[in-house]
Image (cartoon, rainbow, N blue to C red):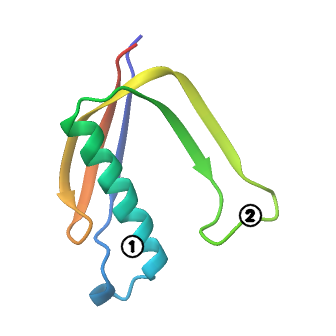
Amino acid sequence: MQGYFRKRVRPLSIELNEDPATIRHADELFEALTDAFTRKMKSHLMLLKGTKYGKSSGGLKTAVDGDCWEVSELHGSVRDGFNFILKRVE
């Protein structure tokens, strides 16, 4: 079963007048992706829609893929923007 998930994150920094919480969330994502990429970790893909500061009026919405995924590509930085590709492996 083949599958790919691609994502591009625009450049984020205080100098670009971005919200500190947005930068912090991007830093956390980039750190997790870097760790998973360098250690070739397999993980489950979970998509989450909510808000940065609590629950939205409709509640949180999530979807989880039961297969395993690996970060196959990771380029860039939070400050310059980054992109990554997840590949389904099992």
- Nearer-N-terminus badge (2/1): 1
Using the numbered discs, state the Cα–Cα distance from disc 2 to disc 1 in whole angstroms. Answer: 19 Å
Q: Which residue is drawn at 40% across and 13% down?
A: 90
Query: 10 Å neighbourhood of mark 1: few (<14), some, or many (≥20)?
Result: some
Return the residue found at the far right: 57
Residue 49 percent location from the top left of the image: 63, 53
- Give the total number of marks visible in the rendering: 2
Give the labeled residue for mark 1: 23
Helix, strand or loop under label 2: loop
Give the labeled residue for mark 2: 55
Q: What residue type is labelled 2?
A: Lys
Residue 36 percent location from the top left of the image: 29, 38
Q: Residue at x 31, y 55 (%)?
A: 30
Residue 12 percent location from the top left of the image: 32, 74
Query: 10 Å neighbourhood of mark 2: few (<14), some, or many (≥20)?
Result: few
Q: In this view, does 10 lie above or below 87?
A: below
Tell me whether circle 2 and circle 1 mark residues in contact (CB < 8 Å): no
Q: Determine the image quadrant of residue 78.
A: bottom left
Q: Nearer the viewer, residue 35 or 9?
A: 35
Q: Is residue 49 above or below residue 10?
A: above
Q: Nearer the viewer, residue 46 or 10?
A: 46
Helix, strand or loop under label 1: helix
Q: Residue at x 19, y 38 (%)?
A: 38
Q: Is residue 37 above or below residue 7?
A: above
